[in-house]
Image: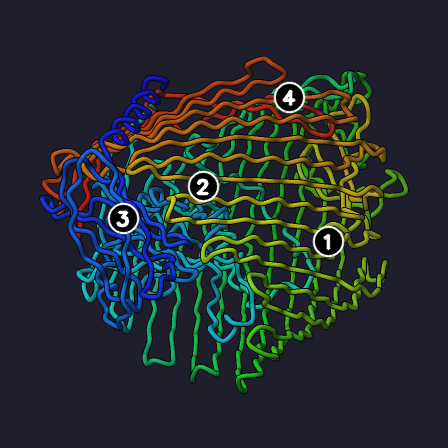
Amino acid sequence: MKKLLLLTIFMVTLISNAQVQLKGVVKDSIGEPLEMANVLAINKVTKKMASYGFTDAKGNYKLDLEKNSTFEIKISYIGFKSADFEITTTTEDIVKNITLKEDNSLDEITIVSKMPVTIKGDTIIYNADSFKNGSERKLEDVLKKLPGVEVNDQGQIEVEGKVVEKIMVDGKEFFSGDTKLASKNIPSNAVDKIQVLRNYGNVSQLSGVQNNQDRVAINIKLKEGKKNFWFGDVTAGVGNSPDTELYLFQPKLFYYTPKYTINIIGDLNNLGDVVLSRRDVRGFSGGFVTQSPSNGTNINLASAGIGFLNAGARNANRIETRLSAFNFSYSPNKKLDLTGFLIWSSNSNGQRNINDIDYIDPATPDEFRDTETSQTSNTGLFRFGAVYKKNFSNQLNYNISGRFSNEFTTENVDSRLFSDVTETERATPYTINQDFSYFYTANEKNIFALEVTHVLQDEDPFYVAALENNPNNNNDVDNDGFDDAADDLGLDRTNMFYTLEQDRKVKSNQLDAKLDYYYILNGKSNLNFVAGTILSKQNFNSRFFQILDNGNEFNPNPDIDGIDDEQITNDTEYNFTDIYAGVRYRLKSGIFTFTPGVTFHSYNSNNTQYGTEFFKDTFEEILPEFEAVAQFKRSESLTLTYKKQINFTDVTQVARGIVANDYDSFFAGNAELLNSNSHNLRLFYRSFNLFNNTNVFAFVNYRKTADQVNRNTIFVPGSAVSTATSINSPLDNENLSASFNAGKRFGKIQTSIGGNFSYGKTYQFLNSNANTNEVYARGFNTRIGTNFTKAPNVSLRYRISFSDQSNTARNVDVKTVNHSPSIDFDAYLWNSVTLTSDFSFTEQRQNGSATNTFSIWNAKLAYRKDKDAKWEYELVGNNLLATGSEASISQGTISSSINERFILPRFISFRVRYQL
C-alpha cells in the first residue's frame, strides 16, 4: 500500500513537471470580464482534447499543457463570437488575454459538446466519454469517476452530499423510486452526457417561487446510435465455490424512441450480486414527493414487519437472487406522458452469527449463541403514473404504486442459557400508495397547487418460538433460562418445549391533502399561503399464546396465573388528525434569498383499546421556520435553515398488550405517550469551481428533541429475558453532526479529503432509571486516484473513524478506532483486455486492543476483441483471500457483545456477455 501511494505521488509530480501553463483574462468589447467562458485546447498532432477550463468571476483562465507542443485554442461564450488561435509551448508559461465580440452564432454549442464538464444554471453536464478509459461496463462505473459525484456504501448516488432523488433517461423516468436499477444496469457505452440537475423540481410553474436546493436528479442523454434501436447486453456465467455450484443469468435490454421507451432487466444468480435488497424493495416507489415544503408534522405509520437481514456479500454466507423488471414510458401526444413498471423480486439468503454476550448484571450468566438463519422474501411491485400538461398553466399528475410480499424466516439457535431454540416467522404484507396533484397558473400573479396522497398498508406477521424445557427442574436455582419469564407470563411449565405463538395485524389508512396558493408580489418576492389536513387511522391487533406438547392451545387463567387477557392481546385503534394553515414569504435581495414562514396546527390524537377510548390529546401549536440562501456565484452558495417539528408515534407504541420481539425480549406499549417536538438547525455550503477544478461541500446539523419517545427496559437481576415499554423522556435529547468534503483535480489526478463529526446525547431508561448515553464520533477519509484514458488507473482511499461512548448504566467508557485502507485498480490494455481489482483492509481496535481484522480482495479479467465487439469473456474472483467471517463489538442497554458474522466464501466464476 505504501509503495503504491508513493508511486501515485511520483506520477503527480512527473506530470506537473512536464507541463507549462497558458493563462490570461477573457473580457467583452467594453472591458467587462466574462465568467464561465469555455476554454478548450486541442493537440494539433493527435487532434484530441489536451486540456479544458473555465473563466472565474474576474475572467481569468488557465490551462495546463505539455511542453514543446502545438495546440489549437478555442474560447467561447454564449452570445459572443468565439476566439480561435494557435500556440506552440516551450518551457515557459504563456500569458494571452482575449477580447470577445458580440455575436449570435452557435459556435459555442459545438465547443461545449467537447467539454468534459460544463455548467448551465443549476445543471452540471458531464461528457461521459471524457471520463472513460474502456474498463467501464455500467453507468455506475462512470459515475464513480465524475468530480463532485459519489456512490456510497449502500449503492446510492450522492451529489455534494445529497442523495440523488431519481434518474431519468432522455427525460423519461427510469424505474422511479430507486436509482440503483439505473446505475447498475444501464450500459456505459450508451451514455453520452450525464446531466446533474440541482435544485430539481418537476413542475416548471413552481420553479420561480420555491427553493429546491435539497433535491437532486440525474438525466442521462443517450448516444445517437442508441435511439430507435434495441441496445443492452445479456450475461451468463457459471462457477464453483466450496459448498455449491454457481450460476448467473442477467439480460438487460433497452429501447428508446421519442414517443415510447421499454426497459427489461432480469437477474438470476447465487453469487451475492444483489441489485435490489429487501430494504430497497420496501422503500421502492415510496412514490409521493411533495412539490411544496414540509409543514412541520411527522407521523409514523406502524410497521410490524419481519426483521430481515439486508443481505450482502459482507454479512451473509448464502444469497440467491431473482429479479424480473419491466419499465415503460409512452407519450401519445405532446401533452400526455404515461410511465410505469412491474417488478418481481425474490431474495433468499442464509446467515450464521456467533454472539458472545456479557450482561451488565453479574448475577446473570454470560451467554454464548450460535445462530443459523434462513430467510426468503418474494415481492411484487407496480407503479403507473400519468402527467398531463394541457399548457404551461395547467399540469395534472396521478400516480399509483403498490407492493405485495410473501416473506418467511427461520432461526436455529444453539444457546448456552436457553439450549436449543427454533424461531419461525412469516408475513404477507402489502402497501398501496396513490397521489394526485394539480398545478394551475391563473395569471402571472397567481399560482395554485393542490396535492393529495393516500396510503393503505397492511402487515400480518405470525411468530413462533420453540424453546427446550426440562419440566423437572422448575424449582431449582439453576433452572432453564426461560423458566422465570415463563412463570411471569403465566405459561404451562410442565411441557418439554415452550412453544410460543403470536399473531399480529397492523392496518394503516392515511390521507394527506393540502392546497398551496402563490401570490407573486414582484420579480423578487412572493407569498405562499397553505392549508391542509392529515387524517390517519391505525389498527393493531395481536394475540400471544402457548401451544402445549399435545397440540392444544393453552390460555392462562388470570385468577390463578395472575395474567389477564388484556395483557396477552391487543385490540387498539389509533386516530390522528392535523388541520393546519400557514404562510411563507420569499424575498430576493442581492445575493440573498430569505424565506420566513409559520404554520398554525390543530392536533387531535386518541387511542381506543379493547373497545374503550383510553387516551385523548387535543392541542394547538405554532411552528415557525426560516431559510436563507446566499448565492455567492453560480455554483457557490450557503444555506441556513431552521424548522420546528412535531413528531407523533404509531399504534404499536401505544398498544398495552405483550408483544414478543424475540424469545428473550418482550415489549408492551404505553397508552399515554405524548408527541415529541424538535428544533432543527442546518447550515450547508457548496461550491463547484471549474476554474480551480475544485468541489467543496460542508454542512452542520443540530437537533434538540423534547419529550422524545424512549424505551424503558425492565431487567431482573439473574435473568437473561428482558421486557420493555415506551416512555416520554423527561430530558431533552441532543444531536450535533458536521461533515465536509473537498475534491480537486490536478490534470488526470483526482484527489479528495473529507471528515465528519457527531455528538449525540440520549437517555436510556433501565428499570425506570434514566441513564445518560453520550457518543462522540469523528472520522476522516482521503482519496487520490488517476483518470487516464490510455493508461492503467489506480485509486487509493484511507478511512479512519473514532468513537467514544460513555453510558452511566454500564459505568464504562468505550473507545473504538477503525482503520480502513483500500485500493482500486482498473486498466484497459491492447484495446481488448480489461483488468479490474479492489482490495480493502479493516482493523477495529477497542480501548487500545485490536479486536478484529479482515481483508477482502476481488478481481476481474475480461477479454473482447475490440470496443465494438459483440462478445466478451470474463473471469471473476470474489473474496479471493477466502476471508471467512467479520467481527464487531456492540454495546447495548443491558449487555455488551462480540458478534462474529460469516460471509460469502471465495467465488470463482466464468461469464460470457453478448452486447446488442
User: Which numbered disc, 1 or 4, marks the residue that appears first in the sequence?
Assistant: 1
| Residue 862 visible in rendering | no
State which mark lies toward you, 2 or 1: 2
Q: Amino acid at mark 2?
A: Asn
Query: What residue does disc 4 label?
Result: 815
Q: Are marks 1 and 4 in contact (CB under 8 Å)?
A: no
What colouring does the structure picture have?
A: rainbow
Q: Amino acid at mark 4?
A: Lys
Q: Amino acid at mark 3?
A: Tyr
User: From the viewer's perspective, is 709 left or right of 441?
Assistant: right
Q: CA distance from mark 2 to mark 1?
A: 30 Å
Q: Secondary structure at mark 1?
A: loop
User: Which numbered disc, 2 or 1, marks the residue that appears first in the sequence?
Assistant: 2
Q: Residues within 10 Å of mark 1 (few under 14, many from 20)?
A: some
Q: Residues within 10 Å of mark 4 (few under 14, many from 20)?
A: some
Q: CA distance from mark 4 to mark 2?
A: 26 Å
Query: What residue does disc 2 label?
Result: 152
Q: Are marks 3 and 1 in contact (CB under 8 Å)?
A: no
Q: CA distance from mark 1 to mark 4?
A: 33 Å
Res 2 quadrant in image: top left
Q: Secondary structure at mark 2?
A: loop
| Residue 629 visible in rendering | yes
Q: Amino acid at mark 1?
A: Thr
Res 892 quadrant in image: top right
User: Which numbered disc, 4 or 2, marks the residue that appears first in the sequence?
Assistant: 2
User: From the viewer's perspective, is 185 left or right of 488?
Assistant: left
Q: Residues within 10 Å of mark 2 (few under 14, many from 20)?
A: few
Query: What residue does disc 3 label?
Result: 52
Q: Residue furthest bottom?
A: 443
Q: CA distance from mark 3 to mark 4?
A: 47 Å
